[in-house]
DNA sequence: TAGATTGTTAATCGATTAACAATC
DNA sequence: TAGATTGTTAATCGATTAACAATC
């Protein structure tokens, strides 16, 4: 009899839901700053223009309970989301490729809540090695292996040029890294147990440009 | 009788499909470089590890026809995709907020095909105004309005701090901008005809971190 | 011709939305 | 109590996957 008894069998949360959660978190932190201590799903839905039912379902993954007619406690929700997402733990990461995007991410993490902490960056470019970006050391790429063994880092951020992406990803795996955040356009071929999250700027720009061109044609007709 | 006759009624292409198209484009360009002139959906599917049927359906949006037993012409597909996505036209854009992420995007567009061309950047920070990033001028934010009127730019890239995002977005609309690429965490409230594409780094990191924590729990059990 | 692949139509799967009972 | 909201279950919607005929 699966899922019965004390062991609550956790259902895998869908990717669309997961992607919406940081949005709720940011919204709720702003609400908290305004002194709002209770907030209902219909209110959230109106502000974030999405369906109230969806808000209820999304927030249910945190296990935080709301009160009918009142809503949820803002503080509890924030902590429930942070806990569920793992944003309150320090998820340490290595970054390889301290170019433009890599540098942006390093500097970015101070202001935006990415939920992870880049503790060191690596690059083969001697001009970058030894510098600090956003308070993070840029080290020789060679040192990745030895440092990984010592620090037991699980997350690798991949912001190299496309042509070395596969090689660096494999080195990440060698180093014991379990999850790779891939900003290159390369479709990485890695062992099945490695978690890969692809972030493609081109995908989003493609949607934007296409929608714009769509609307222009529609107007012309 | 809708959709009949010469006017082929274009069906709206789904967002998941749209997001996959730049991936095909990159893959096909690499294939072309290797001298591959014909390529089949099963081959593409194997390399990109996705379903061959999906490849066929995705590529069908371009209108490019394949030959049974042979596949598609690489060159035709590349051009079909570029044309469909609008990546061969110059989609000119303004960027507001020449901070870390903004700078990265400006420098990035030279190497990565984003399909759009940032022709000027704007910032209120006097230290940034007058500089060049990735060959792009950073101008006074004040000048956005007058320059928009002259250049008829349709796309705005929003990489400001969150607290000014809504204001700048409204100014974009005032300036005649029709599509906004929003990198802030703010849920923009704008007229319905304005196209907004949200890109949230936090969403992707949330998926990554959660999947990692999921897998660690599973292994422990 | 035989066989692989395209291209379309049908079936499945999963996420979103709607409905409604429980509850404060 | 009355009414708004939670939380769950059912219905809908859309995307992915499977099936299969057309075709080179």
Image (cartoon, coloured by chain):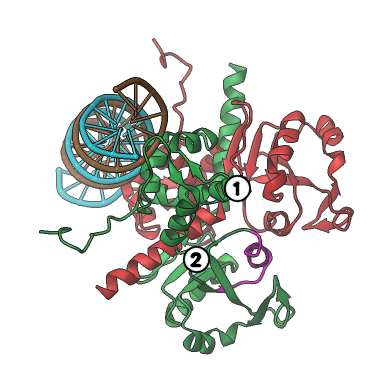
Chain colours: A red, B green, C brown, D cyan
Q: Chain under label 1?
A: B
Chain bearing mark 2: B
Query: Within the magenta stretch, is there residue B62?
Result: no
Q: How far apart, in angstroms, are the residues tagged by discs 2 and 1? A: 17 Å
- Upstream in sequence: badge 2 or badge 1: 1
Residue A172 got which mark?
Answer: none
Same chain for mark 2 and mark 1? The answer is yes
Left or right, residue B209 beside residue B73: right
Residue A180 image position (x, y, % from top left)? 65, 38
SS under mark 1: helix
Mark 2 in CB contact with mark 1 (< 8 angstroms): no
Depth order, front residue of A119/A156: A156
Residue sitting farthest toward the top:
A1
To which residue does mark 1 refer? B30
> How far across and down, in percent of the image, does residue A43 sit?
36, 55
Residue that label 2 marks: B88
Q: Residue at x 67, y 79 (%)?
A: B137
């Amino acid at each position: 009899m699966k899922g019965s008894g004390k062991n609550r069998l956790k259902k895998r949360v869908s990717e669309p839901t997961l992607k919406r959660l940081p949005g709720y978190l940011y919204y709720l932190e702003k609400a908290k700053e305004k002194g709002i201590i209770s907030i209902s799903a219909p209110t959230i839905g109106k502000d974030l223009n999405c369906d109230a039912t969806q808000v209820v379902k999304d927030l249910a993954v945190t296990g935080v309970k709301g009160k009918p007619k009142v809503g949820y406690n803002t503080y509890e929700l924030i902590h429930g989301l942070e806990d569920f997402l793992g944003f309150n733990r320090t998820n340490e990461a290595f970054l390889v490729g301290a170019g433009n995007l890599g540098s942006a991410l390093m500097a970015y993490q101070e202001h935006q809540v990415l939920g992870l902490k880049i503790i060191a960056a690596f690059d083969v470019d001697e001009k970058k090695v030894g510098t600090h970006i956003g308070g993070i050391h840029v080290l020789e790429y060679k040192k990745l292996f030895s440092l990984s063994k010592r620090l037991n880092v699980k997350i690798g951020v991949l912001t190299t040029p496309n042509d070395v992406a596969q090689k660096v990803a494999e080195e990440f795996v060698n180093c014991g890294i379990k999850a790779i955040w891939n900003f290159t356009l390369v479709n990485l071929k890695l062992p099945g147990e490695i978690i890969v999250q692809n972030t493609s700027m081109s995908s989003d720009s493609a949607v934007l440009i296409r929608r714009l061109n769509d609307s222009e044609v529609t107007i012309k007709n």
